[in-house]
Amino acid sequence: MTKAEPTDLLVLLRELEPVVEANLNRHLAAAKEWFPHEYVPWSEASDFDGPLGGQPWEPGQSRLSEVARVSLVVNLLTEDNLPSYHHEIASVFGRDGAWGTWVHRWTAEEGRHGIAIRDYLLASRAVDPVALERARMAHMEGGFRNAYEGLIESVAYVAFQELATRVSHRNTGTASGDPVCEQLLARVAADENLHMIFYRDLLGAAFDLVPNTAMRAVTRVASTFQMPGHTIENFGRKSVQIAKAGIYDLRLHHDDVLVPVLRQVRAFDRPLSGDGDAAREELAAFMADLDAQASRFVERRSAQRERVASGRS
């Protein structure tokens, strides 16, 4: 008879705490201290109109392409919802012991990202500061709510999400064409990578402890995944622009986000039973369909680019 897997949250938290502590210590040893102000081109900054009587913003002041601006703003607004993320993750992980230490450390590190990106955008006059602030207010007023249930689903989500965010930041930096922006976002992406490693390895430990539960969680999260910024106004249109530019698209999501995490936690190689086996079959079918969708998208994008290059609409 297959041994029953523990499902009680407190039991799972207690069983996984040694893994959290070990990975926290590894993270603290690997993480490098850095300072947002060192990555901002302050020498380019000038006063805006308003109480200081500076120069109003206008589009010609930005050296970035439209899609680079869109992607930077989406990334920044996503980072801005950190208070909601902290609330959601602390509600699941708790604020005590190694779990609590990790939650607060993660929050502190994530807080640098929004500071640095906003300062870069304003110092370089890359975006309309009034529109940016209004978008921040609207997005944060909507907050963020964890769409998943329980500890394992929450861990699975952040494992995928941190890697997706890393990919998005790095590719946005490359697309910006600005070495200053690229250096900044590479630094931010390095943080996101360490966060991903923490959550990915915690997910692997969950597979060791409760393989069938973990498999069900991973299948649900992978098949319903949405970026944390999906509630940003006009996110659908913006995400299409970002995908067409190759910054973040279905191919990247399949190849560079889902596949690496699934491979590292050995999702397709573990002995499972019952609904765990069924969930793995469901995941395999989902991944095959996503792969096909990604290929079709890339083909359509290539064809469109060829038409534009040849002067055809």
Image (cartoon, rainbow, N blue to C red):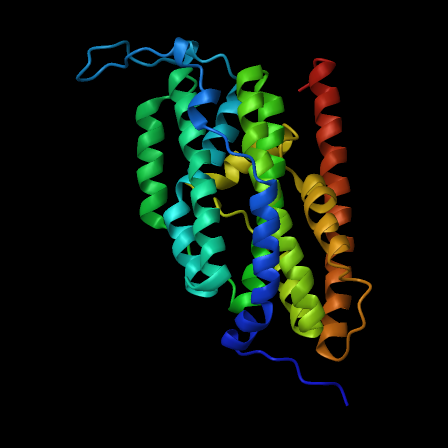
Residue at point 71%, 42% (across, down):
256
Q: Is residue 278 left or right of residue 237?
A: right
Residue 117: quarter of image: top left
Q: Residue at x 42, y 23 (%)?
A: 37
- The residue drawn where x is 73% and y is 33% is 300
Q: Can you give x and y, in whole percent of width and height, for residue 30 in the image?
A: 61, 41
Can residue 147 be seen from the camera position used here? no
Question: Residue at coordinates 71% horizontally, 46% vertically from top-left?
Answer: 254
Q: Quadrant of residue 163?
A: top right
> Which quadrant does the C terminus fall into?
top right
Q: Toward the viewer: 80 or 134?
A: 80
Residue 185, position as x, y percentages in the image: 55, 28
Residue 277 at x, y percent in the picture: 77, 73
Which image quadrant: the N terminus? bottom right
In the image, 23 versus 196, the foreground residue is 23
Residue 229 lies, with reference to residue 307, above or below; the image says: below
Residue 38 appears at what percent x and percent y?
46, 21
Give the left or right position of residue 301, taking residue 158 as reference. Answer: right
Total numbered labels placed on residues in the image: 0
